[in-house]
Amino acid sequence: MAKKNKSWEHRLAGSPDELAMNFVESLSYDKRLYKYDIVGSIAHSAMLADVGLITKKEADQIKKGLLEVAEEIEAGKFRFDIVYEDIHMAIEAALTAKIGDAGKKLHTGRSRNDQVATDMRLWMRDEIASLQGKIANLQKAFVALAEKYTDDVMPAYTHLQRAQPVTIASYLLSFVEMLARDHCRLSNCSAIMNVSPLGCGAVAGSTLPLDRNNTAKRLGFDGIMNNSLDGMSDRDFCAEFIFDCSLIATHLSRLAEDFIIFSTNEFDFIRVADKYCTSSSMMPQKRNPDMLELIRGKSAGVIGCLTAMLTMLKGQPSTYNRDMQEDKLHVFRSADTVSASLEMAAAIVSNMEFKAEKIAAGMDNGFLDATALAEYLVSKGMPFRQGHGIVGAAVAACEKAGKKLADLSIEEFKKFSNVIDKDVYSYLGAAGIIKKYATEGAGGVKQAKKQITFWKKKLAKI
Ligand code: ARG
């Protein structure tokens, strides 16, 4: 490794230690910020010219030089040398090598502290928009699948025990709702984060007449951070972003878990497309849902990032400490994992099939109509708690006799309660119940259709 001294390190004696250099560098992972670093520097130098700290000509030279650096990086021609520690110094050094003295003026009134905080916010704004696009794609995939199954029943489970019949569509639409909250949470994160730390400097701002609103406006921020100590060191937005990613990962993990269970021989509710399964090296019959297992498995890493981020922050004394460099590892890992999992989940959902007939045929087991029967008794004027007891007794009797509730004759029903009449049969059996649900948001046919109409309209705009 070349032993170069950084031009600004006159304070330190000797040449850099290779072990320390490898330890301290962040260039290997913060180079992905290059575009935002360059955009931020162009805005900063334009502002310096506006307030008269550099000439317009120097600002133009800086801009031209930075754009050339950007082109070199994009073309893969830029040499990233970790002697410069991070992307900020690597770009500044390359600029100065290109344009000479004007390059040395770029860092006027700026520190890497406010620079990196600015870069991260700019990067995150774009990343959030990209993640939101992927969330919307997954929502669209769920709505399209739900549309195929608005009249088909499946059991809804609580405690993983059969609970009540719902439409398959209602089940699928439940994920659309979760994802809508994820989308909204990211919008909140973006709104809170979109203020400029640029001009906060190393910690105390600057004695130079910098115009912070000028750079904020140029970079599309909604305003500036009010306090330089807070502004350059705030990493709340990173923690919040990783939390949002963790919750998305958690939602994806739960849906993966459902689909893994549903695709077992024991359930056999769904078929995950072959291309999203793998086989076993030993057992020729296997179709393993590895992609779903990895969605579930990868969520652990994202949650780990959240723990790492908060732990990294909690022990630090006020303002910037080098610990903060590690924020990027956790933020990038969370974003990359969630981005990949969202894409994979959308592909799986788009190519998935429910075995609706088979599910319907198995709906008679488990007394899924018991609650509907108790509610039928309520409609006849009976207190719910009494109806609950009567149905409990009827279920126990049926269980003993190996029957389902719909098998009971009116005479048999009358033994449990004489308010029961012939109209009881429309409350029994899953297919009938999903048409009978009356409350808004219930798991029935009408409600599913209404939700599909709502989401189709809403998602068409995204
Ligand atoms: N690479 C550093 C980071 O990501 C940039 C800021 C360095 N600041 C400093 N005072 N050493 O945090």
Image (spheres, helix red, strand yellow):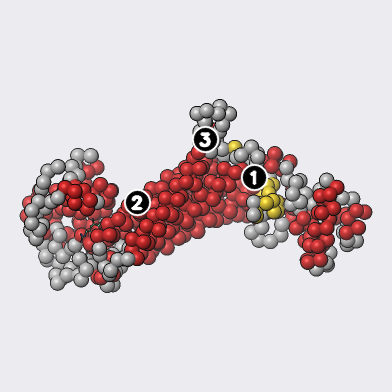
Does 42 sit left or right of 390 as displayed? Answer: left
Q: Which residue is mark 2?
A: 332
Q: Which residue occupies 17% across, 70% down? A: 206
- Find the distance from the CA under tag 2 to the CA under tag 3: 28 Å
* SS at mark 1 in the image: loop
Q: Nearer the viewer, residue 43 or 383?
A: 383
Q: Which residue occupies 64% across, 47% down? A: 168
Q: Which residue occupies 44% across, 47% down? A: 298
**Residue type pointed to by label 3:** Cys
Give the percent coordinates (x, y) of residue 22.
21, 48
Q: Nearer the viewer, residue 400 or 268?
A: 400
Q: Are marks 1 and 3 in contact (CB under 8 Å)?
A: no
Does 219 sit left or right of 286 as displayed? Answer: left
Quarter of the figure with the N terminus:
top left
Q: Nearer the viewer, residue 205 or 416?
A: 416
* SS at mark 2 in the image: helix
Tell us which disc is closer to us: 1 or 3: 3
Q: Which residue is mark 3?
A: 277
Q: Which residue is mark 1?
A: 149
- Find the distance from the CA under tag 2 to the CA under tag 1: 38 Å
How crowded is the residue under tag 2: few (<14 C-alpha within 10 Å), some, or many (20+)? many
Corner quadrant of residue 324: bottom left
Give the mark nearest the N terminus, 2 or 1. 1
Q: Quadrant of ligand 1?
A: bottom left
Give the percent coordinates (x, y) of residue 301.
42, 50
